[in-house]
Every structure is written in C-alpha cells, then in structure tokens.
Amino acid sequence: MENSHGCPRTAKDVSLQELRDRLAEFARVRGWEQYHSPRNLLLALVGEVGELSEIFQWKGEVARGLPNWTSDDKEHLEEELSDVLLYLVQLADVCGLDLGQAALAKMVKNAEKYPVIN
C-alpha cells in the first residue's frame, strides 16, 4: 500500500527522534544550521501554520476523514501538516528540548486539570 505521495506505507511508526536526526542532517549537509535559530524556526513555523489555515479558511465545517476532499486536496493538507511538524521538531531540537517527553508531561497535566466527570 502506498500513501498519497507514492511512498510505501510501512507498519513502522516514525519517531520524533528519527525526524529530529534526519532534519539535523538535512540542514547540516546544506549548511543551513546557521539560519536555524529558535527565532527563525518559530517564524517559519508560524508561516506554515498560516498556510495550513488557508486550506480550511473558506471550507466551513469539515467532516472527519475528509470524505468530500479530492486526493489533491488531501495531499496538499499532508504537505502543510508535515511542514508544521518538521519546523516544530526542529524548534524543539534547537532549544534542547525533548518534544516527545514534553508532550507526554503536558498530557498528564491536562488530565489533572480536566478530570473525567461521570
């Protein structure tokens, strides 16, 4: 089975560490590390969130699973979501933070702040 980009889907989940390592190598071999300050990465992230928002801007409510979207629309969404994720991972890395652990800790805090009410 292939994803919408023609790449084979695998049962293996991609870890944040793998993304971080690949992104660091991608930037290193291109000499881009000098441009990847926390500020620059944050501004790039905000720009990508804006591009992601544009996809939904005039669509109104969208059903789960995007049943009425074309494959091209879904591919565009995948690309913009990926850009946001990649910049977020890079930002955390440049700041010396473990994004996965931070997310898990935040989920624990949220569970305490918003307990299940029966």
Image (cartoon, rainbow, N blue to C red):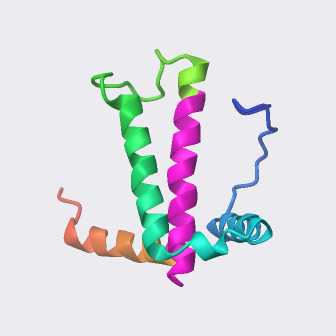
Q: Position of residue 14 (x, y in %)?
A: 69, 58
The outermost residue toward the left is 117
In the rendered image of this protein, does residue 99 appear above or below residue 96?
A: above
Residue 30: image quadrant is bottom right
Expressed as whole percent of the image width and height from the top left, the position of residue 116 reads 23, 61
Task: Report the residue at 79% width, 45% height from top.
Answer: 10
Give, as a single range, the part of the protein colored magenta: 75-100
**Residue 22 horizontal/vertical position (percent):** 74, 65
Residue 34, given in percent of the width and then of the height, sits at 62, 76
Residue most extreme to the bottom: 96
The C terminus lies in quadrant: bottom left
Rendered position, 33 above or below 77? below
Quadrant location, the N terminus: top right
Horizontal side of residue 112 vs 33, given as left or right: left
Q: Nearer the viewer, residue 88 or 9?
A: 88
Assign the magenta stretch its main secondary structure.
Answer: helix
- Seen at 69% across and 65% down, the residue is 23
Does residue 20 sit above or below 77 in this rendering? Answer: below
Q: Residue at x 55, y 78 (%)?
A: 94
At x 45%, y 57%, the residue is: 45
Please state if 114 lies on the left or on the right of 36 as rendered.
Answer: left
